[in-house]
Amino acid sequence: MRLVDVRQPRPPSPTGSWFGKAWKLGLATAFVVLLLSSRGASQPQTHSQVAVRNLAATSIPCAPLPPGVTTWDASMGSIILPTNDTLLDPNACVGGIVVPYNAMLVIDGSKGSVLISSHGTGISVQGGELETINTSATSTVTFDAEADVASWDGISISADPHRSGDASLSYVSIQHALTAISITSGALSSPASGSYGLTVSNSGIGPSYFDGIDATNTPISVTGRIDPGTGQSDGLFGTLNNIGSQGIKVMFDPTLPNYPATILARSLDVENMTFGSSVPFGETNCPPLTSCAAGTIGNDAIQATFARNAQEPVLINNNQFFRAGSYGLELNNPNNPVLTSNSFSHNGVGSTEPSGTCPKNAVNNFPPIYLNNAVVDLENQVTGNFGQHDGLEAIVLNGTVTSSTLTWRTASTDASKPLGYLLDGDLNKVGGNFKVPAGSVVKAKRGTLNLNGVRLDANDAGARTFFTSLRDSSVGIDAVCSVFVQSSPPNPLPPGDWGGIDLLAGASASINNATILYATNGVQISDGLTSTLDPTYGPNFGLVIRSSEIGASFFDAVSATRTPVAVVGTQLACP
């Protein structure tokens, strides 16, 4: 696909206002904007480490590279890729500059920074290899579109019958591509790694009209440079900014070609990166969220979908996420992901309407982190993640928690506290302890707390604890008008708005000074223990509820089967 823009060469310009939310309103709108607007007028300001275009130039012919190693370097001057527009040239290079299975393209920074610009065609690694060598902060590689076109086709990496294509890129800037990098080869190694088919280090991705990096059935590593003063990503080398749709999009699907039988290290490794609102590639004196670093990501900063119940490890560590239009991080079917020391700011911010109202056509608010159908150790492997000014300040999840002891962390807008939890489905836990401190607010959408053989400790006598629906705005963080509660709920909420607390097979519970609202069954226990933690009644009862209130439930407020129960000083509402 080509997006052609007939115009004068682009001048420097401020950030285009169409990036970001247009993508959430539909691709059709974005296409219209792209086709009717010049890149000079609408694209974000970008800078190349190659400050002046060399007078000498080398035009690359539209032909597969020969067997062996082909090297491009600064001695070639500006390296020009041909057009792919058959309206301009009947012999246009539609399939890209092909790197076949028996070839390797090396881009060498030893003679200085390298500029590669395209009249539209991309680089297509079809079973071959692409590698940058001898690059650094002062000797970079820049890919960009020529001034007479709005975009180019980016870098694509695929397999052929002989070999799986792979690539390793370092200190590279990829600008104005449709999608900067896409890989579908299933490669399990690359020149820089024995574990990843694609490695991108200390590089800048964007602007991209669609996605920054797309990977299917291929493990990838995307890493940035650390600021030694702060220990965080430096925002100079290691950025994804001004992306039309997804920053990084990853999919592992056994029904698609090249699905790997095993993952040697991790399926996805993203560390020390800055997403959105980062400085132009390699520039200094431009902090995030300032005008010189303006920019957004249209949808998710990272979106990854894994095969169900597969061992596809994930590490997302020490990244900064700014101004993603939807989720900062969305993981579907993750299996024990490691999410540590990430910071989120101004992500998923939609409607500015007052709390409790959801105006028609309002853009919904999103949380920084969403874990869908997850198997996750929240206590030990999801730690040190902070957010501020995000749409819904929480880690929203459903699935199974593997922590031996889980201590509930209540979601709040306090930026000094790590992100807390909200549920948009079931929370399942087998064995161990579930600690709910005094003053906690546990909110769930439709789901149930399924505690199999778990000891539930909500026995603190301090501030009141609440178990309630995600649609309940009266307590805790307000999720109304988020992507999970897209319409204003009735007032009062009906019984059965979420499942309640279900204790099974050797479970026990001590609940003190708590309110349980709008559940299908407030608390139900089956084949529980005969003792629990309560200091007064615990030795003789598997379920103790004291000084609490259970609101109207769709079925039962308290239900017990083959378990001794003590309900003391507690108000039970009629169904």
Image: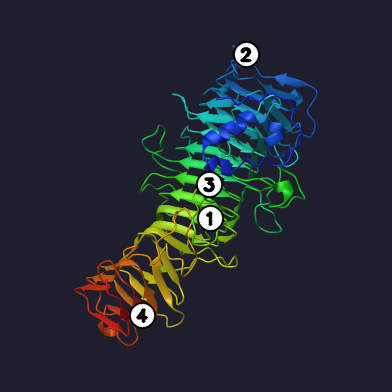
Point out the tag, 2 or 1, that comes first from the N-terminus: 2
For the residue marked with disc 4, what is the amino acid? Ser
Looking at the rendered image, the quarter that the C terminus falls into is: bottom left
The mark nearer the N terminus, 4 or 2, is: 2
Q: Confirm or deny contact between disc 4 and disc 1 (CB under 8 A).
A: no
Within-10-Å neighbours for mark 1: few <14, some 14–19, many 20+: many
Does 58 sit left or right of 564 as displayed?
Answer: right
Mark 2 → mark 1, Cα distance in angstroms: 46 Å
Callout 4 secondary element: loop
Q: What residue is shown with label 2?
A: 89
Three-letter code, disc 2: Asp
Q: Position of residue 310 (x, y in %)?
A: 37, 47
Image-quadrant location for residue 239: top right
Find the residue positioned furthest to the left: 562
Which numbered disc, 4 or 3, marks the residue that appears first in the sequence? 3
Residue at the image point whose x is 54% and y is 30% from the top: 156
Identify the mark nearer the N-term, 3 or 2: 2
Give the residue number, with chain letter if any, for mark 1: 368
| Mark positioned earlier in the residue sequence (3 or 1) | 3
| Identity of the residue furthest to the top in this view | 90
Which is more N-terminal, label 1 or label 4?
Answer: 1
Mark 3 or mark 2, whichever is nearer to me: 2
Q: Is residue 255 left or right of residue 285?
A: left
Mark sitting on residue 548: 4
Pinpoint residue 42: horizontal percent, then vertical percent.
68, 36
Secondary structure beneath dot 2 equals loop
Mark 3 — residue?
302
For the residues labelled 4 and 1, the Cα–Cα distance comes to 33 Å
Q: Nearer the viewer, mark 3 or mark 1?
A: 1
